[in-house]
Amino acid sequence: MKFFGFFVSALFLNLTLFAQSIHHKLSMPEPQSHYFHVQVEVSDMPGEELIMVLPVWAPGSYLVREFSQNINVVKAKDEKGKALPINKTEKNKWKIQKGSAKKVVLNYEYYAFELTVRTSFLDLTHGYLNGTNVFMYPEGHLDLGGKLTIFPHATFSKITTALPKASEGVSSDAGTTFTFENYDQLGDCPIEIGNQEEFSFTAAGIKHNVAMYGVGNYDIPKLQRDMAKIVEATTAVFGENPNKEYWFIIHNTTTGSGGLEHTNSTTLNVNRWSYEGDDYLGFLSLVAHEYFHLWNVKRLRPDALWPYVYDKESYTDLLWVMEGFTSYYDELILRRAGFYSKEEYLGKVKSTLNYVESSVGNKVQPVAHASFDAWIKAYRPNENSSNTTVSYYPKGHLIAFVFDAMIIKANKGKKSLDDLMQVLYTKYYKELKRGFTTDELRAELEAMTKTDLKEFFNNHIDGVETIDYPKYLKEVGLTISLQEGEQVLFGATASDDGGRVMVKRITAGSAAEKNGLSVNDEVIAFNGFRVTKSTFTDYTNALQPGDTFNLIINRDNQLMVLDCVMGTLPFVRYTFDLDEDNKLGQYWLRTL
């Protein structure tokens, strides 16, 4: 017995000493150079070769961003400091000939000078990074947990991240160590390093931490109160909050660029003066959108995104649910939390409806295709995108609205889209622990609406037929009127580029297209008169269908004369009237 016990103890000690592990170390000795210095220690990996991989995209932002372009040279050595042969075998993969080495130590520098919610940035004012940009993982070992030690620059006093801390304090000598259970967690916890202002509030029984980088006209007590309302209203949709603690990282900059969701945190990049008036409601809508993703996308997500594959595209036709439904709720939540009156909320919905249905691309690209092609179209728009694509954000918003009305009607005001989200979250995330497919979504919707939705999906999700909004939305008290016709419009969008009138967009089928005007043309004169952006618009707006005129343009430094005839474009406009006494409408527009 003693011998057996000793044997077991020795075996356990042996396994412990030689367990596979990974330890990332991050430093920033010269922030003004914009380089993060990264050291990765990988221990006890099998085989004589080790392949290290850097992701090519950040979940939630569906574009291959080629993060490896920011890495110059990667060096490898063993535990004794001896250099190991290393070769780059693909754009984002490095193969190390480690032989019998127990530990491989990698060193590289990452150039970080793009401050968006999905990239990384470092200068003398702060550092910010997303793990998928910067940290490599051993190929085939995404489940490997480990440690991250951060050594802030001496002028930086704070680290904000949702990663659990393994050691206390921030010291330029000892660093601060965090732990992660697997690469998903490391990659999913953005990190803010600097002198950010921090505060917290409690909502839905959970502590929420906020880190503010950059000056702005924000008022902390107001944010604590209003962000708490958003959290409470969003949590009520699902009936529970899965977090123990949550982090907001907010960058206050000159130009806001949106947000990116994470499992228990988010990063928001907003205009520094956006905390008053309508801009403030836009900020709160962004908070609601990214917080709703805490459930819808980060936990409840398409089968194609479960698990994440980091080194290539993951195609799904369901982003109209993940982003579109979230867009529907980010405004509805503001209504429920009391920030919008009924009229203000309906104005938002009407604006979305008119935007989508007046878009040329809405009749070209089905919303399911927009989702699937997000990797090559949504994040790479060109001058013709408005003619050929539809955004799954507002189009999905409208589809969510229609499904909400259908569920409310079928269940006589006892259930809504909230109940569908709860069913999907409970069944697929909590119980089955996997993603869902389009067929499964349709089946759940059919059960809740008591309707066969095959034709709806064929026509409006996989097709481009116009949804009969008056038919579906009358059940919640909306009388929707549609005005259609032709409007006099030239169809060229121009900008002022240092006094030059430059064509930026041409509407398909317009007089501008038919008369030969192209994007990047400089418009010099209208009927012999020199134009500015303003006068060019005034001249064309004063024309009637069939009127003739000529334009002098500069195309690639060659002067040309275009003889033109004014034309028309289709006109679509929806208006709303709300029956205040409609019980189902009262349920739909309820406040908490």
Image (tube, grey):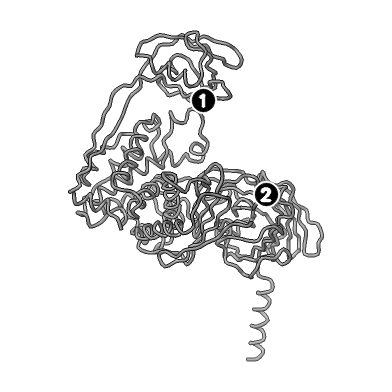
Seen as rendered, the residue at the extreme left is: 581
Q: Nearer the viewer, residue 127 or 94?
A: 127
| Contact, mark 2 vs mark 1 (Cβ under 8 Å) | no
Q: Nearer the viewer, residue 505 or 316?
A: 505
| Residue 455 image point, x, y percent | 28, 40
Q: Nearer the viewer, residue 432 or 487?
A: 487
What label does residue 123 carry, if any?
2
Amino acid on which disc 1 is placed:
Ser
| Residue 492 image point, x, y percent | 45, 22
Q: Nearer the viewer, residue 169 or 456?
A: 169
Of marks 2 and 1, which one's residue comes earlier in the chain? 2
Reading the image, the residue beneath label 1 is: 495
Q: Quadrant of residue 12?
A: bottom right
The quarter of the image holding the C terminus is: bottom left
Amino acid on which disc 2 is placed:
Asp
| Residue 477 image point, x, y percent | 21, 45
| Residue 56 image point, x, y percent | 59, 47
Q: Please tell me how crowded label 2 is: few (under 14), some (14-19), or many (20+) other residues with Cα within 10 Å.
A: some
Q: In this image, 368 relative to 171: left or right?
A: left
Which residue is rendered at x = 40% and y = 65% of the image? 204
Seen as rendered, the residue at the extreme bottom is: 1
Q: Please tell me how crowded label 1 is: few (under 14), some (14-19), or many (20+) other residues with Cα within 10 Å.
A: some
